[in-house]
Amino acid sequence: HQPVLKKLFLLLNNRKIKGEGANIATVISLVKPVLAKFDCGDSDAAHEGDIGQVASIVILIIYGIEWFVLLFPNLVPLARPASSMLGAVLCLLTFQITSEFSTESFNAFCYIDYDTLALLFGLMLIVVMIDESGLMVMIEMTLESKVRWWFLSKICFICAVLSAIVMNDTICLFFTKPILEAVRKHPKMSENPLPYLLALCSSTDIGSALTVTGNPQNAMIASIEDTITYHNFLLSMALPCITAWVINWLMLLVWYRQSLGIVGAKKSNTNRLAHEEIKKLAKKPQNSRKSGPDSGCFMSNCGCLVPREDQNIIQNFDKEEMIIRKDTLAAGNTYKLFLIFGIILMIVGFFVGINIAGIAIGFGIIFMCTRSVIESRAKAKRSKIELVDSESEKYIESVDWSLIILFTGLFIMISATVQTGYPDKFFQAIFDSCKEDPKDQCTWMFAFMILIFSNVISNVPVILLIKGYIGGTLEQGVVSRKNWMFISWVCSMAGNFILLGSATNLIVADQARQAGHDVLTTINHGKFGIPSTMVCIAAGVPILLKTMI
């Protein structure tokens, strides 16, 4: 398209080409061929269902299978990123085959949420920089506690409050690693890190419901309904969110009371295996077992037989850890202050209304480049070698690209499913009689359907579906505002229902898996998430209906 763009450039500079005046009509005629290649059409028409019945059925089958595979990734030898991309490719192939390979039938790139991907990339880059600077150790020290239930309570409170200020995805990316590090250093916590990961996921989702900047669906709803302000949204959501947070916190304490040491904990699996090993050794002949100082083993405090060469490592663990912490906190104070100042500016930008994805990726790159220059100069000075940047590539490789691939595939699959038109038809069949004021006319059915759809096709597409269906029937004003607030709160709570219900769940599960704690599975999450979400919604909806303004 270089010839067209060249003409456009000259016209915009008030020049004339072959008698054509530099007017709006000429500019539009020249721009159209270029923009047509990137035209995604009307986003509100994403659920018209004009792709054909055969293609729709095939896509629904593909999405159903992939949704099940993403829930239970251990059933097939494919990780979640590979599964999501496979589903996306199959959906695109279905569109292309049924449309006889027409390039205008479905443009996958129009349905990828680039803002979300840019936000994830920027935040992950910032997390890498925070880890490199030693700030992560400071966060870890803030959370640490020898009392397990108090440690979990601090996670619930801090993450809920911060997720109301900054977007919930940000909090999960910042706090997963420090929480896992704190758990790893506590023998009893490391036996079962699941309660602390669930506390992180659930608290961030509940806290994010409090403000319009807490999560993407709240921000989208605020842009749809002009009468929603930061002030009236906060006042309306305060009591329901506090109620849901208290219920979730108490349920965590009761549900995992043994792991948290509230009631006598069960004998750990590690100790049981160690005692079984000791019994086996006891059955051996006396002369076949070494004893005394030359035996090569010693008995640790937990009852485990540990090689003698590892004895000093275990006994001096706390001392070495304190030395590492002291060195980490003392190093690079100027860069730490630079990071803190930048993060504060980033949060201010969130409140002012600047594009959060642009802020995140901008500050992430600035932090990375600054750190790379500092490290490269230090290496060159020490080794007296040429100044070469070898750090930035390492930092970029530290970004979790598999998570970005996972969300890219999910965006394409979800948009393809919405394009079939069946979700919209389902909404019409159920809410046709109460679409003028669904929060009052069919309160619990409306809440239940939002809960289910948020976990099947994700929360942001649900907002678009509801906007296309009831957006035109609700008059701007109190009724419309209260309905959108109702939708926003239930969507946020629905993120705790199953593992695929919220991006925060997938972020925490993926980071925990990479750290060697593959405990946040669909079944483990659902055992607590499903009852907790149901109780929170049941208790919060009546309060929400009375407190909305």
Image (cartoon, helix red, strand yellow):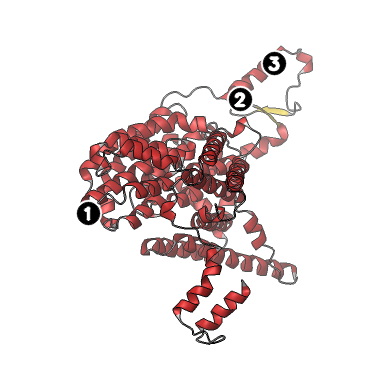
Above or below, comparing residue 30 to residue 415 in the picture:
below
> In this rendering, which labeled residue sits more in front, label 3 or label 2?
3
Can you give x and y, in whole percent of width and height, for residue 56 in the image? 51, 40
Closest to the observer, 250 or 482: 482
Mark 2 lies on residue: 303
- Circles 3 and 1, Cβ within 8 Å, touching? The answer is no
Figure check: 36 above or below 192 = below
C-alpha gap between disc 3 and disc 2: 14 Å
- Which quadrant, please, contains the N terminus? bottom right
Residue found at the far right of this picture: 287
Q: What residue is at 25 percent from the left and 48 percent from the top?
A: 482
- Pick whichever of labels 2 and 1 is earlier in the sequence: 2
Determine whether the residue tagged by mark 2 lies in a helix, strand or loop. loop
Which residue matches tag 3? 280
Q: Amino acid at mark 3?
A: Lys
Q: Secondary structure at mark 1?
A: loop
Q: Would residue 413 be visible to someone looking at this image?
A: yes
Report the side of 342 relative to 74 (left or right): left
Q: Residues within 10 Å of mark 3 (few under 14, many from 20)?
A: few
Q: CA distance from mark 3 to mark 1?
A: 75 Å
User: Which residue is painted at 38% across and 44% down in the image?
Assistant: 492
For the residues labelled 3 and 2, say whether their Cβ atoms are less than 8 Å apart: no
| Category of crowding for the residue at label 2, using alpha-carbon neighbours closer than 10 angstroms: few (below 14), some (14–19), many (at least 20) | some
Specify the amino acid type for callout 1.
Gly
Q: Look at the numbered disc 3 and give the secondary structure of its residue.
A: helix
Position of 105 relative to 69 (above/below):
below
Percent x, y for residue 191? Answer: 55, 31
Does label 3 or label 1 sit earlier along the sequence? 3
Q: Position of residue 160 (x, y in %)?
A: 38, 46
The residue where tag 1 is placed is: 477
